[in-house]
Amino acid sequence: MNHDRTPQDPLTDSEQREWLAQERAWRDERAGNAHGDDPVVTSYRTLMRALHAPLPDALPADFARTVAARATQPPAVDTRLEQQFQRLLLTALVLAALVACALYGSDWLRASVAALPLLDRATTLNWSAALAACLGLSWAMDVLRRGARQHRMRG
């Protein structure tokens, strides 16, 4: 029993009956006595039996294969609704971007063109090189990832 009590607090009648049933089930199970007619004791005996049963020594021999097969199976849930919502949201985002470009595009373009002469040639070259490096590394990592996945699937 998990109660916050001091050792001096007496057990209530229901707690006392419960404790006695647990003790009787423990003694009967250890002694191998026949099942009694008290359902509370019988339920505790089932619990005592389960607690004293030895744990399995090891995982089944095909455990890894079974887990791998489950991991590679497609999900059991139907995701068509989510895919439709994603398409709808993507369409709304593209439309919103087109509307924003139509409304504010000329202002943005004028501000961008006005800012370009403020940058010197070296800064523009550095930022262009950084952008090219980022794009190149992203592309290379994607190619490597795809190659590794194909190698694992063959092997």
Image (spheres, grey):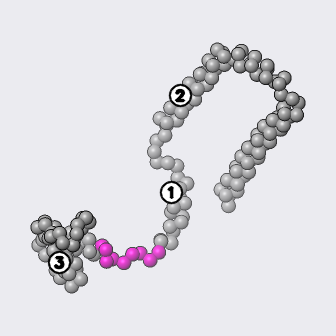
- Residue under label 3: 24
Please say whether residue 69 is visible from this viewpoint. Answer: yes
Residue nearer the viewer, 1 or 73 = 1
Q: Is residue 24 left or right of residue 72?
A: left
Q: Which one is in front in this view, the residue at disc 1 or the one at disc 3? A: 3
Q: How many marks?
A: 3
Instruction: Name the kind of residue labelled 1 in the image.
Output: Arg
The image's mark for residue 88 is 2
Q: Which residues are magenta?
A: 50-58
Near mark 2 (Cα within 10 A), the count class, few <14, some 14-19 or many ≥20, is: few
User: Relative to residue 55, is residue 137 depicted above or below?
Assistant: above
Asked which secondary structure carries label 3, the reply is helix
Q: Residue at 18% x, 72% y: name it.
A: 8
Which kind of residue does numbered mark 2 sit on?
A: Leu
Instruction: Mark 1 and mark 2 in contact? Answer it, CB < 8 Å.
Output: no
Q: At which x and y percent is residue 113?
A: 79, 20
1 left or right of 133 in image? left
Residues packed near mark 3 inside 10 Å, few (<14), some (14 to 19) or many (20 plus): some
Magenta span: chief secondary structure: loop
Residue occupying image coordinates x 84% and y 33%? 123
Q: Which residue is pictured at 88% across the width and 30% down the height?
A: 121
- Whether residue 15 appears in magenta in the rendering, the answer is no
Crowd rating for badge 1 (residues with CA inside 10 Å; few <14, some 14–19, many 20+): few
Residue 59 as seen in the image, left or right of residue 14: right
Residue 70 circle label: 1
